[in-house]
Image (cartoon, grey):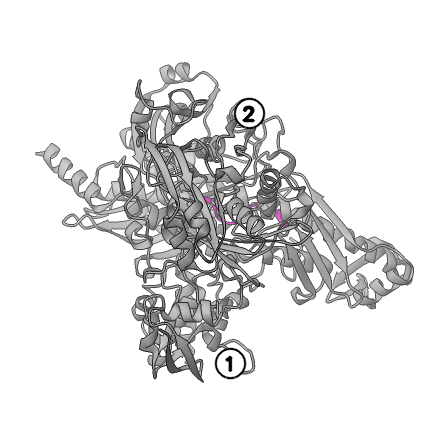
């Protein structure tokens, strides 16, 4: 490969020094002149009719500047898709979960705002509520929304090949059911929004987001103002992990309060509000039937998944599909049927999440281990035999342009000493493997592509203008790295204007792991556009062809004769004096099938490319306490090309902690009648530094034909494959296949006890 | 009723009128507008609000403001060197790729700085224990521990 100055190197992220000094501002850190404190009144009932809301006492409280209810809004219902428009930002008729927004106030300080909330009198008529998928589907269950019969919100049906014939031709068929409760994000930063209007009616708003343009359009709709008056500003974002992509009631409420009070308003969610009233991830029950031949190749598979979606649609059609799609990408399967149901309950709203459901991926993988055990084939070999390959089509008709799945399996296997360990470890000592795949974007309508602009200054420095957002994963650095590499300048020469809807062009957002592939390609093309314009000028000066030039070290020179050179600054000055445009523009539209739709037509190219990965973990289980000690882990992913290896390692390690250590050992919510009993970090038991094992990172590169420099995405699959590896390793250690996640000590002890009884 | 307190804040003598009900975090963020210290939970679980008081890392969200009287408080704003360059521990976080979203980082740096100021060569276990009250959801803690180790080893 061509040698690069910045690409492929461990570049220090451009955004991190200001984070290390505390200077980086998050939404909750903003202080605006005359700013008010916003607070939200929430439903104490899981399901109730709103009879009346009396805000008169709150409005009279000194210091209260605005009170809003549904009356202040148009009553419009929001949804990611036309067919899922079911959520009002403040409801008019009913509340559907404990914690749903009912009214809001803006006041001069927090104490006054809280007192005002206590003065709002809401009369409710409690309604029967449902808290589980089974209860929601029961014949006489109360309907949460009139438009969803039987509380079935979404049904995704995929049917490829001949599944029944496949089962009849299989050597061995198994059917198992796997369950997992909902998971929570626990982003470091609690949700916060600040909003203000200027005297021309322009909205400025700051909030954590996974795509500023995804927030701007619904704000424009609900506020009834044109898009060019909605200025979602760039701000440091404290994590997303699949959440924070959609418009949130807090965004809309904050804007309405600011407009009504004619003053800036800031709402900072408490940790409990962040847990309950942003998004959670789906609880699910997954039944998987798989038929294999004698060698362990999957012949047919039938999956039915019932997901607890909570009270509203959110990103439902996507969330129901992606767990399945990840697995159909990861493993070859010709005859496949999937029925994914999203069922509504009176619980907080569920959205997209990094691991896409523990009971799905872990179910597919655990069952593969079980089938292998019956055939006498070890789990690693089972995966090698079923691994996706470059040039394949997935069952739902996506072409796989590059795939390093087999290499990730082989390299994790070799480095972990799989052959020497599997089946040969002492009792209560186990090893497990998980493999998975993720997308680099979806068909996203008009938001599917990204554009970037580059402006040159007469000193040779540039400003890159792009809609790409950084949630913490390092996208800002990726932009700077690509632009500086292409133009042969230093990262210090690059200024970044990004994720601001006033000035930056459309971009899909960091949602769906697409920013490097789609946004990165757009930035690269914009930089190449600028470079060609500069080369045209230099070529004229040197009397050579444009293809004979190189840009490096802030200079343009003749490649074969570097003495013949000019500073980029000089080329810019020549262009300016000749009135020649040297601004650059780049645009990238991924090769996806625009006709593909989650429910109506789930076939066609889903994403231009996919990443693939494997995790192996080795564990010891204490049979007395059920505690799991992870001895060591090996995490691999085919990232296409590692633009910044250290950043990618960080993504692997973070994904491992969330999907594996936290997601499989400790994290779950406890409930009482729709109320979350453990909304806090330690109640939910997110992993601590002392919990983490040694992780060996293995970066696999396949050089994707269309990714920027061959890059795809940086480590998302590790969260899922880590969960799968934990599941396999613990099952291997105790000699019982576990089907209910997370694998808490009580579940493990019960399994060990059950095994003991069976053996007696 | 507000009361006057005198303490040292980032090496400067500071006299403030405070409400005795405030926490130290409230004084820092809401009154002094020093927003480098973060609030991630407000009840002492996440460590984003960690500051150093007389050499000890503490959660400022739980620390009654009146207790600050006569003490020396260091916040993230007081860590960088006088010429504006980063303290070695801050630099290590940047160099080792330990910073992702960054919300937990000021607290992490304060906890690890408190350890390193007390102990020249802490063990890996002591390093992990020093940040066991600082929660990070992005990094899996690996590069954070690497960063602290790199400073500890370099001393």
To which quarter of the image does residue A291 belong?
top left
Residue at figure coordinates x 33%, y 72% from the top left? B20
Tell me the tag on residue A603. Answer: 2
Measuring from the top left, give residue A671's x and y in whole percent. Answer: 27, 40
Tell me: A678 left or right of B86: left
Residue at 50% across / 70% down in the picture?
Answer: A21
Magenta segment's dominant SS is loop
Q: Which numbered tag is attached to residue A714?
A: none
Residues at marks 1 and 2 on the same chain = no
Q: Who is closer to the viewer here, A478 or A252?
A: A252
Closer to the camera in the image, A708 or A463: A463
Disc 1 chain ID? B
Which residue is at 38% across, 54% downward? Answer: A115
* Residue B153 visible to the viewer: no
Query: Where residue B11 sits: x, y (%)?
Result: 44, 84
Name the disc covering residue B81, or none: 1
Q: Is residue A653 above or below residue B50?
A: above
| Residues shaded magenta | A708-717
Q: Residues within 10 Å of mark 2 (few under 14, many from 20)?
A: many
Work out which residue is located at the far left of the displayed protein and give it. Answer: A760
Dot 1, crowdedness within 10 Å: few (<14), some or many (≥20)?
Answer: few
Query: Is residue A713 rendered magenta in the image?
Result: yes
Tell me the element at label 2.
Answer: loop
Q: CA distance from mark 1 to mark 2?
A: 58 Å
Q: Vertically, is B151 above or below A26?
A: below
Mark 1 or 2: in front is 1
């Amino acid at each position: 490969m061509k040698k690069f100055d910045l690409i492929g190197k461990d570049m220090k992220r451009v955004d991190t020094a200001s984070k290390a000094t505390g200077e980086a501002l998050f939404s909750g850190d903003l202080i605006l002149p005359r700013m008010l404190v916003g607070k939200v009144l929430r439903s104490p009932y899981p399901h109730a009719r709103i009879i009346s809301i009396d805000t008169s006492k709150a409005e009279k409280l000194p210091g209260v500047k605005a009170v809003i209810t549904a009356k202040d809004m148009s009553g419009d219902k929001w949804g990611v898709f036309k067919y899922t428009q079911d959520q009002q930002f403040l409801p008019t008729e009913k509340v559907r979960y404990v914690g749903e927004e009912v009214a809001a106030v803006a006041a001069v300080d927090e104490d006054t705002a809280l007192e005002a909330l206590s003065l709002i009198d809401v009369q409710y008529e409690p309604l029967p509520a449902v808290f589980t998928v089974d209860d929601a589907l029961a014949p006489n269950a109360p309907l949460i929304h009139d438009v969803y019969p039987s509380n079935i919100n979404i049904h995704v049906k995929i049917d490829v090949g001949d599944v029944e014939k496949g089962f009849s031709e299989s050597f061995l068929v198994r059917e198992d059911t796997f369950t997992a409760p909902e998971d929570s994000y626990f982003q470091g930063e609690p949700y916060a929004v600040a909003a203000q209007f200027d005297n021309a009616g322009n909205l400025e708003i700051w909030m954590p987001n996974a795509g500023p343009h995804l927030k701007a359009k619904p704000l424009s709709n609900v506020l009834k103002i044109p898009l060019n008056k909605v200025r979602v500003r760039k701000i440091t974002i404290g994590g997303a992990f699949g959440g924070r992509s959609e418009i949130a009631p807090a965004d809309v409420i904050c804007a309405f309060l600011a407009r009504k009070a004619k003053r800036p308003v800031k709402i900072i969610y408490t940790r409990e509000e962040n847990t309950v009233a942003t998004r959670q991830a789906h609880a699910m029950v997954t039944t998987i039937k798989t038929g294999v031949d004698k060698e362990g190749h999957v012949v047919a598979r039938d999956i039915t998944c019932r997901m607890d979606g909570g009270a509203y649609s959110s990103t439902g059609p996507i969330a129901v599909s992606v767990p399945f799609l990840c697995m159909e990408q990861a493993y070859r399967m010709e005859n496949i049927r999937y029925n994914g149901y999203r069922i509504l309950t009176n619980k907080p709203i569920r959205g997209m999440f990094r691991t896409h459901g523990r009971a799905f991926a872990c179910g597919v993988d655990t069952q593969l281990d079980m089938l292998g055990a019956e055939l006498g084939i070890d789990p690693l070999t089972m995966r090698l035999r079923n691994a996706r390959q470059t040039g394949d089509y997935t069952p739902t008709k996506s072409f796989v342009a590059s795939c390093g799945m087999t290499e990730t399996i082989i390299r994790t296997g070799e480095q972990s000493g799989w052959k020497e360990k599997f089946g040969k470890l002492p009792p209560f000592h186990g090893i497990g493997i998980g493999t998975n795949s993720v997308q680099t974007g979806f068909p996203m309508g008009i938001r599917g592509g990204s554009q970037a602009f580059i402006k040159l200054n007469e000193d040779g420095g540039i400003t890159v203008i792009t809609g790409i957002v950084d949630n913490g994963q390092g996208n800002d650095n990726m932009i700077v790295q690509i632009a500086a590499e292409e133009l042969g300048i230093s990262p210090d020469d690059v200024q970044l204007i990004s994720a601001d809807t006033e000035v930056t062009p459309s971009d899909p957002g960091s949602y769906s792991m697409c920013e490097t592939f789609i946004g990165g390609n757009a930035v690269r093309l914009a930089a190449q556009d600028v470079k060609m314009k500069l080369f045209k000028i230099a070529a004229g000066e040197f009397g050579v062809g444009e293809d004979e030039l190189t840009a490096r070290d802030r200079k343009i020179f003749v490649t074969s004769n570097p003495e013949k050179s000019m500073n980029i600054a000089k080329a810019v000055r020549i262009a300016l004096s000749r009135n020649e445009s040297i601004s650059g523009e780049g645009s990238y539209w991924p090769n996806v099938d625009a006709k593909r739709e989650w429910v109506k037509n789930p076939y066609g190219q889903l994403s231009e490319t996919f990443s693939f990965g494997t995790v192996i973990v080795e564990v010891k289980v204490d049979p007395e306490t059920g505690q799991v000690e992870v001895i060591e882990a090996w995490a691999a992913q085919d990232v296409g090309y590692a633009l910044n290896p250290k950043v990618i390692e960080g993504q692997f390690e973070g994904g491992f902690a969330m999907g594996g250590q936290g997601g499989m050992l400790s994290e779950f919510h406890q409930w009482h009648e729709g109320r979350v009993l453990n909304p806090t970090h330690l109640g939910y038991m997110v992993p601590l530094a002392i919990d983490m094992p040694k992780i060996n990172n293995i970066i696999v590169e396949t050089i994707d034909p269309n990714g920027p420099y061959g890059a795809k995405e940086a480590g998302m699959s590790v969260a899922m494959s880590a969960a799968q590896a934990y599941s396999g390793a613990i099952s291997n250690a105790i000699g019982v296949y576990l089907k209910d996640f997370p694998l808490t000590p009580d579940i493990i002890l019960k399994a060990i006890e059950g095994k003991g009884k069976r053996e007696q | 009723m507000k009361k006057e307190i005198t303490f040292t804040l980032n090496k400067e003598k500071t006299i403030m009128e405070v409400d005795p009900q405030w926490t130290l975090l409230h004084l820092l963020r809401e009154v002094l507008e020093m927003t480098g210290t973060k609030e991630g939970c407000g009840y002492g679980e996440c460590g984003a609000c960690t500051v150093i008081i007389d050499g000890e890392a503490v959660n400022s969200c739980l620390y009654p403001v009146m207790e600050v009287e006569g003490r020396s408080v260091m916040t993230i704003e007081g860590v960088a060197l006088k010429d504006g360059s980063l303290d070695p521990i801050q630099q290590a976080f940047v160099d080792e790729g330990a910073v992702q979203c960054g919300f937990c980082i000021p607290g992490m740096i304060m906890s690890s700085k408190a350890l390193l100021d007390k102990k020249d060569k802490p063990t890996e276990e002591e390093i992990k224990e020093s940040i066991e009250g600082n929660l990070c959801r992005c990094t899996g803690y690996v590069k954070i521990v690497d960063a602290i180790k790199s400073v500890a080893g370099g001393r």
